[in-house]
Image (cartoon, rainbow, N blue to C red):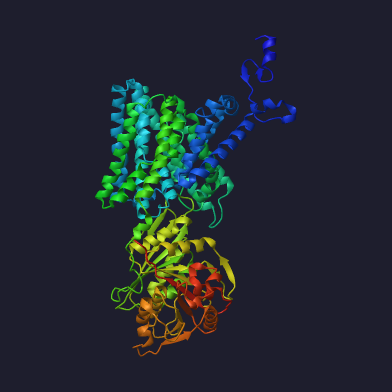
Amino acid sequence: MGDSSLNDLKPEYRVDGSCWKFVPVISEGFFNQRPSDIFRHHLILLQLQLAVIFTLAAIIHFFLGRFYLPRLISEVLAGVILGPTVLGRFFPDISAVLFSEQSVKVLATLTRFGYLFFMFLIGVKMDVNLIKKSGKREWTIGTMVMLFPLLVTVMVGRHISIVVDKVDAQSAQYEVSFFTGVLMLTSFPVVAILLMQLKIINSELGHLTLSSALISDMVSLVMVNIGNYRVIMLLASLRVALKSLFLVAVLIVFILTVLQQMLYWIIRKTPEGKPVKDAYIFFVVIALLVVAIVGENVGLQYMYGPFILGLTVPTGHPLASTLIDKLDTIVSGWMLPLMSTYCGYRSNLWNLNRLPPYWIMFAVTFGFFLKVACGFIPAFCFKVPCKDATALALMLAAKGIVELGTFATNADKQSTVTQEFTWAVIIVFIFAALVPILTRKLYDPSKTYAGYQKRTVLNSSINEGVRMLACAHRQDDALSAIKLLQLSNPSTGSPLSVYGLYLEELVGGASPLLLNHQLGQRSSSDGGRWQPIIDVFNYFKSQSSKPTQVHVYTAISPSSLMHEDVCWVAFDNLVALIILPFHRKWNRKGKLISDSKDLRDFNTKVMNKAPCSVAILIDRDRGRNSSIIDESSTYNICVVFLGGKDDREALSIARRMKGWPLVFLTVIRLKETEDMITGWEGMMDDECLRDIKHPSNENGNVLYKEEIVRHGADTSALIGSILDENFDLICVGRHSQRDSPLIEGLSAWTDLPELGTIGDLLVSAEISKPISILVVQQQVIEK
């Protein structure tokens, strides 16, 4: 190489026995170089690319999100616009500068790096205990929906490609099998994301679909790796395949033994309630990178090593939740959208100059309907309703980010031509758009409770007793609820069934759990967080001398969907009344100490969707040390009765309490006039009050009073006088007639509509007495 050549190479090239290219990364600034050279620096170019990609995707999703389309659709469309289909076709100069060949390689590296972390987080979020808890129904659906369509579609598609499309045997053996195989897989994270998007992950159908998808994913993992080793045997030799299989087995055993024990050691070293140290998080990240490198070099695809490592991370607190808190935002919010956009960028619609090959059309049409049929038939045979079974089969056939990532990361290795990759992106795009729309049309979770209209305390049979569900977010909630439950006065003729439900927000997992502790169910953690609540309900049962049954559940789910667990437990157990804790808490001096907006939203959602009556318990009685009411002490209860179905339900709850000898019940009926014209509602009110007006018992513990009020101001004054009396519990109905003169002018000042006008008055009053308030709503779900 001559001197002139050396001069031409500077400053981008250096010579030291060989030639290599100097790649500028960090810019020296506008003032130290020509402005036209600024885009030669890869860091500047990468920052600009990311800004353009995320801005365009956000703009597209702003419009498409109104049609409930997933964000994946907007991200793929952004890639199509920035790729050769639009920008490269109509603005080639801009495309050459913004997405140069070298810079695209950097993007490709980032997408693979992001997909590696995504697969690790998938494993962390999976609760493998779901497989142990799955029954015959889940195993049958999960296996059939994957195994049969995969084998049939791959074999028939490969035959069609050779006979009809004239594809050579080696390409059919490898590329066609890969393409059709990916389309037939069921991905657990794709199904979980879809269920979250549709807000049905906590429904019965959601639990069935999630368990079936997990089983299908595990089976597909085995099938895919069997296929990989078969390809190694065909392209290399049996000796190479066995050697690779042995090394992979050693790696997996190392992960499941050495690394898993180190993860448990990290948990043991982390004090209860304390965060995991950053040094431990760094170790886990380094471990997953090493596992990916080793796995890639011994014959295991680079993303499966981190996935298996993620599965070994114990679900929940503290390690899994910390890993997700640290990694999920950057992976889900940055790396995965980049993967979707990159797939759209690599596709080129202008190359589609003809219809897809027949084997692709076969996989998309026949394969799809076969997969739906293999999901529908076993579900229908297991008594799943027709529409629900169809929705389940559609969701198990959904496609999303996992399929895109598989096509993208294997494109170079599989020698996938641009046309086939473009068809793959189009197919995933169509499935991702249509499956949520079709599922919404087929399945409405609110209709699960249709027809469940007479599960109220008022309509509960005296002989059958009453069933109540007490919800608790913390131990204080359980203690407050069992005081009320004890006052419900169970008897041999009218027993009480109590269902305690501890609610915990899902952190560090994609799999919601509903544990029935009567069946001995436990999660993968030690259960220490909910044991105090279980102990409270068990103590109530042990101390109760009257016929009482107690069942305790734990629900772990996202806060936005937690109300679905409450509604389902109430529906499944024929509960008549749900007791919810109020979102505000007071100390013993009557000072407000907490006010949770999330808990208030949760209560509102339950009241809107509950299949039975609902009561919000505002407990200000912090002075009692014992959770069990002393049978030798008196308890004064007041019912403020304006009329209507909610007031009748509140009175029915109080009527059960009056059977307790030391309970004194006062019913105060507010009337506009002495001879108020009643109508049908008034007649029902009088019928409900008949035994209160003329009590037949000899205890003398019932007092009925009527108060004449002209307008809302009189009602407000009366409520103030009631609060001045020595009542322990005041029961009111939530709803009253909007045009009733009794609350005229009060509704406009209501700050807490979930409590109704009277309930809001009682809670908002400045009182220091330990008076508890029960606001009752008789829920009726429309058909």
Place residue 180 in its image quadrant. top left
Q: Is residue 116 above or below residue 239?
A: below
Q: Position of residue 16 (x, y in %)?
A: 65, 17
The correct choice, above or below, for 459 with respect to 156 in the image is below
- Which quadrant does the C terminus fall into? bottom left
Q: Residue at x 51, y 44 (%)?
A: 63
- Whether 296 is drawn above or below 735: the answer is above
**Residue 254 visible somewhere in the drawing:** no
Front residue of 3/354: it is: 354
* Residue 497 locus on image (x, y percent): 34, 70
Counting from the top left corner in percent of width and height, residue 221 is at 37, 38
Q: Is residue 609 above or below residue 381?
A: below
Name which quarter of the figure residue 498 lies in: bottom left
In this picture, residue 441 sits left or right of residue 331: left
In front: 306, or 726? 726
Which residue is at 37% across, 54% downward?
Answer: 444
Could you tell me if residue 30 is visible in this image? yes
Q: In the current view of this chain or complex, which residue is farthest to the left?
A: 381
Residue that extends furthest to the top in the rendered view of this protein:
2
Image quadrant containing the N terminus: top right
In this rendering, would 326 be left or right of 348? right
